Each structure stands twice: as structure tokens, then as C-alpha cells.
Amino acid sequence: MMEETGIGIWGVPLAIFAGAIRVSTPFIFVSLGESITERSGRINLGLEGTLVFGAMTAYAIAVMSNSPWLGVLAAMATGAVFGLIHGWICKFPKVNDIAIGIAMMQFGLGLAFFLGKPFIQPVAPHLPSIPLGGWSDLPQIQSALNINVLFIIGALLSVALWWAFKNTRVGLILRVVGDSSDAARAMGLNPDSVRLLATAVGGSLAAVGGAYLSLFYPGSWNEGISSGQGLMAVALVIFARWNPIGCFLAALLFGGAGALGPALQSVGVTQGYYLFYAAPYVLTLVILVATSSPTRSLAGAPGALSITK
Amino acid sequence: MTKLLPMNRRNFLKSTATGAAAIGFAPSLFSTSAAAQTALTVGFIYVGPKDDYGYNQAHAEGAAVIKAMSGVTVVEEENVPETVDVQKTMESMINLDGATLVFPTSFGYFDPHMLAMAEKYPDVQFRHCGGLWQEGKNPMNTGSYFGYIGQGQYLNGIAAGYASKSKKIGFVAAKPIPQVLQNINSFLLGARSVDPAITCQVIFTGEWSLAVKEAEATNALIDQGADVITCHVDSPKVVVETAAGRGAFVCGYHANQSPLAPEKYLTGAEWAWGNVYTDFVKKAQAGEKLGNFVRGGLKDGFVKMSPLGPGVSAEARTKFDTTLAEMMKGSFSVFKGPIKDNKGGDAVTADQTLAEDAIELESMAYLVEGVVGSTS
């Protein structure tokens, strides 16, 4: 009887695969956004607040307009405003971008909780997904391959950004400003304006991650929706060495590792689940230690970033 | 108990604000009750949002019931962490709003926060949701109230047992504490009363509220063939929506989640705090002594079941109704031996029949045979 409905031990790799796709999307968008911001030489730690505020805005607008895409657009707009505020404040001399980021995070969270109060109960329309699992008879595989459009956009965006950083004029400007403000000024560029725009774009991408949380998976707005994913995604950027494709892969790894705990319990490996839940963090530590070196600084780090100064 | 408060500015303001009734002439335990008969201010503190379709909503619905009573003012604060913040909230409710009866509803508010406030404000009554109050150890102006909801989960199990085709049901649980374990075991025993071949897979998320992990757990259970899901987390909204989205049936918990999945919602074990709070408030208004250790189950009106959904068959409905009727008479026991635990040991011996208020159930540390899962 059970063989017909359960898929046994194959559930674990499937869950890791499905989890990588389902859970990674917010990480992808926040880390891509942050990689743009950090490449310009600034850190925006406030993206956790932007993510949650984006989740709230997207949900609220989707409830009111009955259109999830309008919700995503509204989230992008608010994310850009949060980025602009951060970028504008950081323009002033002797302002620390990390401290402003923490302040913006708390501001975003608080404002989202305050404005989001009436939207905890209503049910919003979900973002569409593309059923790519039609070839399989197994409902588990069909469900795992029900891939959201935003995930696909995120994947394409990571390749596009990787290419753009290397091969376009905008990418070059971003990298020059990020590596040396003086060199940028010598080229006639205004580092503050570039960073302001980079932070705004980063914020609007992070807010898309929030929209995915509230409008697709898990697909509901409440105050615990993010539980720190925005902060982890900022850390992923360093882990991925400021490389957009690396950000995408790191996000997949995090999503998949996060699915390990529930999946193992579901096939009966039930001892020590707290340990499995720590898997993503253990993995991060292992990779960071393995790739670190006592003789050189972080490879790929933008020179003007406040953590590398 | 008639300890006169030192006359500092705060206490002076407080007593004038509440009508200056207490000083001198009210030697009773509940010394502000003389003033309270005309106006009673009751404070409610929630750990999360009060419209979460879950634990906090159940309490807020109870608060809404007493709000409608005459002479009662209700003050509420939500999203109060289980830290010194809750002490500040209690102080402001007492000093600024004049609350004389306070319900801190979350488990972690009790020690040290509520106990500290109870010592500082001996004229205010504190009642905490949970089973932590101990006579002789904790002050008499504090107390505990709680409901036996295990029988509700047993009824959930009956509905699930009839609805399941795969004979596999799933439980998304937060933490392996006795009350959660009792709910899991009751859910399976209810389902096994329908078909002894049913198993229940449990996944612990490790936290009371983790939306993404709850969704992942629900998906993992359904991937393994579970076709009826229930849970014990603070807000079942994500579990209910995810499970129904995958086509599984759901049984609710804490509050009525049927609006989230009208077709897939079988029934649910809900709190009926309105009855409990009404009773406390009536006693307070009459100047009577409030109970320090108040508990009850379905038959006492502490717990209720959601209306049965369209997925419940006529056969299931009959068994559900007869079992519920027996529970209402007080003659039903979920934990009636012999019951083995899922490691092969004896959980309940053959000669034991544990009533729902049996003290043994409060320290439950096992999962019964048929539950796939581990407590650590």
C-alpha cells in the first residue's frame, strides 16, 4: 500500500532538489541585489528589512488589486525607495554604511509589521508557476517541478549580471567605483550617484525575493515570514565572492541543505534533527574555511568595500 | 496580604487612577474588587499577531468575548517577546490603563517575568496560560489555566482515519514537549481506532513559528504519501494552505482554519478561551476569589471542535459524534492500556486507564507505536 503512494528513500534527493528550487528564490534575489550594491563599494545590511517590507507590500497590493504581478511591481518600487534612503544617507561624510543598514533593517521590519497588520488574515492570489513535471506519473515529481516564474527569472538574471559585470560599460563603471573612488573620480564619475543607484537596484531586487515569499512559497504574509533569510543572503554574497553565478549556486545549495532536515525525518531518519537543521550553516563554515587563505585577502572583493578597508 | 503599599508617587497615581478604592478598607485577597464591580480593566498579552489563525487568535477571540461584557475594558498588546519587554507591557497595563487582571498568554511569560510583576503588584491578579503554577511556591495572586486539547486531536484522528486512503497521516510539530507529544499520540490513536494499520509520520521543525520550514515539512510528508495533515505550531496557516494546495486533507489546530481550505478541511481542535475568560471576569466582578489552577477539556467548554467539513463521510461523522458524546460525559479515555511506545517499550500498561487530567500525561516523553518519528 505504502509503495504506491510514498517514494521512500528517493524522497531525500528529491526533497533536496525540490527544496533547492522552492526555498532558494528569495536567497537568489537578495544576494544578486546585494552583489550589485557591494560591487559598487557599499554594503547594505538592511536587505532583511527590505525583503520583509517587500513581502508585505506584494501581499497587500495583491490582495487589494487581485493581481500578484502588480504586487511584485509595488514591492520593487518600495525596495528601490529603501535602497535610495540608504544610499542617500550613506552619501554624507563619515556615515557608516553597516550601521545605517542595521537601522534600515529595523525600520523596514517595524514598518512592515505596522502596515501589514490588516493583511495577515486575507488570502492573496499566488504567482503562477510553470508545470515542467508533466512527463512523470509521480505526483511528487510533478510537484517538485512546479517551478515558479521568479526562479527562472532569477536564474537568467544571474547569468545576465555575470556577463554584464564583465562586458558592459555599466558593469565597468560599477567595478571602478567599487574598487577605487579616486580612480572613478579621475574618470569623471561620481561615486555617490553610482552607489545610490546600485543600492536602489539592489533594494528593488531584494523586495522581489520578499514577494516570492509572500506570494508563492510559503505563500502567506505573517511577521515571521523571513526569519533571517535576508541576512543570510547578504552573507551568501561574500561566500560567493561577489560573483552573480556563484550567488545563484550558493542560494541553491542553501535551499537544498535547508530541505535536508524535514526530508530525512519524513523517511524515518529521525534522530538528531536539530543537527540536520544546522546543515546549511555547517556547510557555509566548511566551505569558507576550505577556501580561505592566510596569505591573500578575499579574492574578488571590491577594494572600496568598508569590510576590506 | 493586607500589606500596605509604600506611598510613592507611582502607587499614589495608580490608586487615584483606579478610584482609590483599595487603600485601607479592602482586606480581601482581591483588594481592588470593590472598584472593579463598576469597572474592570483586563489586560491581554500575546506573543504573536492576534489574527494569526492560530494560538494568539484563539486567545484574542476569547478576549473579544469579554470585551462585550458590561463594565469590562480590555487592553491588548501583541508581538510582545518573552523577555523583559513583557514586564514593561504589564507595568504599563497596570499603571497607565489601570488593569487589575492580567492574562499573559504565552508560555515563556511565566518565569521570571510574570512572577516578578506579581511580587511588585500584589493587588493585581495574574493568570497565565499553561500549567506552571505551583501551590506554596508561586504567589497567590498568580495562577495557571489550561485546556486538555488531546481529546480534540483524537477526534481529528478519527476524521483523518476515515479520510486517508494511503493509511499514512502526517503531523508537523514544533518541539517535542509533553503537550505536543500528547497531541501527536492522540491524533494517531484516534486514526487507529478507525483502522489499526494507519501510521503517522511526524516532523519536528524545532521552532514555534518558522513559515518556510513548516511548508517544507508539509511537502516532505505529502511526498512520502501522507494524505491527511495536521500540526502543532503557533500559526497553522502555512501548513493548512500548503497541504490543501497539494491536495491533502487537513485537520486544524488552535483556531478554525476552514476559511483557508473549505474543501479540504475535515475538522479541527480549537480552544474556547471565551468561556474561560468569561468565568474569570465574572468572579472578579463579583469580588470572588479567582481559581489558581484552572483546567478543563471538551466537556468543560475549554476546547471545541470546528464544524465538520465536506470531506467527512457519513460513517466518519457517526463515529465522530458518538465519541464526542462519550467525551462530553467524561467517561472517555484516549490513553487506555495496553499501549506500546514506538521503541517497543510499554507506554501505558494493560491495567492503566489514564483520564484526560491524569498527572502522568503531563510528563509524556514517548511517541506511541505507529508514530514514525523521534523525540530528539
Image (spheres, rainbow, N blue to C red):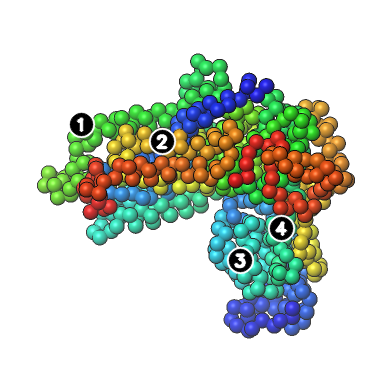
Pinpoint the chain carrying mark 2.
A
- The residue at which mark 3 appears reads as B112
Residue B249, placed above or below residue A39: above
Pinpoint the chain carrying mark 3.
B
Under mark 3, the amino acid is: Pro
Q: Is residue B366 visible?
A: yes
First of labels 4, 3 by sequence position: 3
Q: CA distance from mark 1 to mark 3?
A: 61 Å
Q: Quadrant of residue B72?
A: bottom right
Residue B218 in the image, given as x and y percentages of width and height: 59, 35
Q: Which mark is residue A253?
A: 2
Mark 2 or mark 1: which is in front? Answer: 2
Q: Is residue A208 visible?
A: no
What residue lies at 69% left-to-right and 60% top-to-bottom? B132
Element at badge 3? Answer: helix
Q: Quadrant of residue A167?
A: top left
Tell me, yes or no, whether the two marked residues, 4 and 3, touch with CB atoms within 8 Å: no
Pinpoint the chain carrying mark 4.
B
- Same subunit: marks 1 and 3: no
Under mark 4, the amino acid is: Gly
In the depicted view, which residue is nearer to us: B206 or B210?
Answer: B206
Under mark 2, the amino acid is: Leu
- The residue at which mark 1 appears reads as A167
First of labels 2, 1 by sequence position: 1
- The residue at which mark 4 appears reads as B131
Q: CA distance from mark 4 to mark 1?
A: 65 Å
What residue lies at 73% left-to-right and 73% top-to-bottom? B32
